[in-house]
Structure formats: C-alpha cells, structure tokens
Image: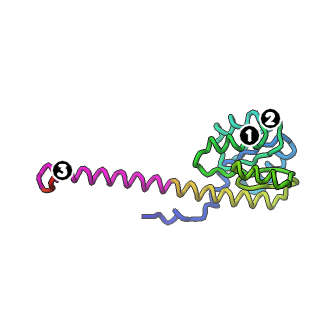
Amino acid sequence: MSTPNQWEDPSADLAKMKILIIDDEPVNAALLEEILVEAGYTRFESILDSKLALQIYKTFLPDLVLLDLMMPPPDGFAILESLRADAGDTFLPVVILTADTNEETKRRALEAGATDFLLKPFDHVEVALRIRNLLKSRRAHQLLDNQRAALEDAVRDRTAELRATVAQLQKTNWLPS
C-alpha cells in the first residue's frame, strides 16, 4: 500500500541532492556555484584539477555531475567514460559544459554517456532549469530502484513462505512429494 507522499513531486528535496562541478577554469566553477546558490542548492563541490575528479566523485557520490570537456589530461571524455563505468546501471546525469558546438564533439560525448549539454557562456536560467529537471529524473529513478528492490524482497520472502508451506504439507502427507 502506498503512503500519501510516496508519489509527491520530488522538487521538495532537490536542494538536498549533491552536485559535482568538474571544470579547470575557476571562473566557470565560481559562476556555476553562484547559479546553484541562487537556485537554492546547498550540497555541491567544485573540482579544478581533473586528476582528482574520480577520487572526489567516489567519496562525494553526487546525484548530478557538471563536466567540462576541454581540460588537461584526463580530459572530460576520459572522465565521462570512467564515471559511466563506475556508475554501472545507476542513472547518473552528466551534463557536459562546453563552448564547442561541433557536431562531432556532441556525438562523441553522447556516445560516451553524456545526458545533456550546456553551452558556454552560461545562461543562468537555462542552467538552473536543466539541473532541476535532471535532478527530478534522478529522484524518479531512485524511487523506482527502491520500489523494485522492495518488490524483489517481497517476492523472495513470499517464495520462502510458500516453500516452507509446501514442505510442511509434504511432511504431513497432505501434498504428494
């Protein structure tokens, strides 16, 4: 049975979700932080050194990643591939930050698992809206994952109960072996 708030719009707790900014340009990271603060987000972290990106990702465990493509090695493409490998089947929105409008760049990033793009220079409203929408999607995926796990547990428990009942009936000869 569902609780009244189970299907409520997840916007209420979006501000609690974690956002990781990976951009080697301090000005861009600061601007994104400012946009996040204006939009009411409080749990974010910026990484300027791409070499630390995966280490911090694994300890911070963000709900969304804002990732610059053009950085000193490892570049955004390499980081994106590592993020996708680490996340596995978990839905992790990764938004690419780029000034490059080249179709090949977009295709390559999408093939590597990018969820969305934000073009530099940033439009504050667009950034806030895309982040909100992707965090809502992330929250919906989390709810579905939790429900799937709960259903799997219920099926496993019920199957064990049925097996125990069948075994008991077989012992008492109410059910042939």
**Residue beneath the point at 34% across and 51% down:** 157
What secondary structure is marked by label 1? helix
Q: Which residue has dot 1 on it? A: 78
Judged by its main secondary structure, the magenta piece is helix
Is the N terminus in the top left, top right, bottom left or bottom right quadrant?
bottom left
Q: Is residue 152 left or right of residue 17?
A: left
Counting from the top left corner in percent of width and height, residue 152 is at: 42, 53
Q: Could you tell me if the residues under marks 1 and 2 are in contact, i.e. CB atoms within 8 Å?
A: yes
Q: Which residue has dot 3 on it? A: 168
**Residue beneath the point at 83% across and 43% down:** 70
Amino acid type assigned to the residue bearing label 3 in the image: Gln
| N-term mark: 3 or 1 | 1
Counting from the top left corner in percent of width and height, residue 150 is at: 44, 54
Please name whichever residue, 102 or 2, is drawn nearer the observer in this view of the structure: 102
Compared with 34, 78 (above or below) is above
**Residue 56 sits in which quadrant?**
top right
Counting from the top left corner in percent of width and height, residue 49 is at: 79, 35
Q: Which residues are magenta?
A: 146-173
Give how far apart the Cα atoms at labels 2 and 3 are.
64 Å
The residue mark sitting in front, 3 or 1, is 1
**Residue beneath the point at 82% across and 55% down:** 103
Q: In the image, is residue 150 part of the stretch drawn in magenta?
A: yes
Amino acid type assigned to the residue bearing label 2 in the image: Pro
Please name whichever residue, 154 or 114, is drawn nearer the observer in this view of the structure: 114
